[in-house]
Image: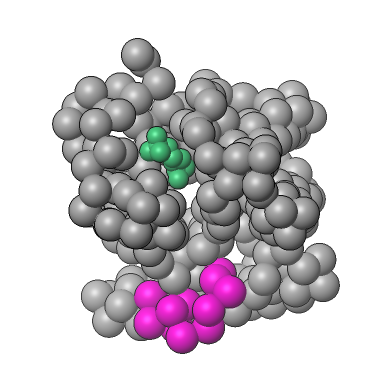
Amino acid sequence: MTGKLAGQVAVVTGAGSGIGRATAALFAREGATVAIVDLAAPAAEQAAEEITGAGGSARAIAADIADPGQVDSAFGDILGELGRVDVLYNNAGVNSAGSVLDATDEDWDRCFAVNAKGTFLCSRVAARAMVAAGRGSIINQGSVAAVVGVANFASYCASKGAVVALTRSMSVDLAPRGVRVNVICPGTVYTPLMEPMLRARGNGDMAAGLALTTAKYPIGRLGTPEEIAAVALFLACDDSSFLTGSVITADGGMTAQ
Ligand code: 1HS
């Protein structure tokens, strides 16, 4: 451990599984007290227990980040108990298969409610605390789907494009106030979130969907949660002190081709 986040408070949304869980564990190993925010209370509590069991500091908070009241309540608890928010990783998200021909209103609304509005709601309350402290780092979760067109993924692509645009806007608003805002655009990482997409791509065959997806990545494999967590740590700590408004693709070369 190098203590890159020693003494800091980090909020990670969607930290009950996948990239968020790996990032929360890494942030804790680097000295942060981590608020594990997740829709699923049992997953949040298990992630927090894993961190505290390993000697780290964590709190579990169940919240739907698409719900303004739940976001305000969650951050009220975090600020009330921990007194500050130094890092916010807006990792929580949903995806939904479907092209413009067959995606439903509900697909669109849910993708935007969680991916775009959830990022906005959490950023608004965290940024107010960070501005008051004169420093902070907000990391948003974009996607390669915000950079290139992904077939059969209309609502998700659009919502992640909104996250990239929001990141840029927030970065110019907050830079003079000492708060940096950047976005990671991961390629596919094999997590529970991705299984519906992989299975759909393989017409019900997960192995076929995985092969078709992996073929899109020049590096020859999908990413791991830990590889994205390492990028989040870079953006969270002062190693990235001159970065704000940056779009960091972490995609095994997928968008380079
Ligand atoms: C879910 C993640 O943001 C990546 S979007 C899917 C891109 S690809 O792997 O299907 O090319």
**Where does residue 253 sit, x and y in percent of width and height?**
30, 22
Q: Is residue 115 magenta?
A: no
Residue 149 vertical position relative to residue 210 in the rendered view, above or below: above
Q: Which residue lies furthest to the top in this view?
A: 257
**Foreground pick, 86 / 25:** 25
**Where does residue 49 sit, x and y in percent of width and height?**
36, 82
Regarding residue 238, the answer to whether it shows in the image is no
**Where does residue 6 sit, x and y in percent of width and height?**
40, 55
In the drawing, does residue 192 fall left or right of residue 73? left
In the drawing, does residue 206 fall left or right of residue 234? left
**Foreground pick, 168 / 125:** 168
Tell me where residue 61 sits by quadrant.
bottom right
In the drawing, does residue 137 fall left or right of residue 167? left
Which span is picked out in magenta?
37-47
Quarter of the rendered structure image containing ligand 1: top left
**Foreground pick, 160 / 127:** 160
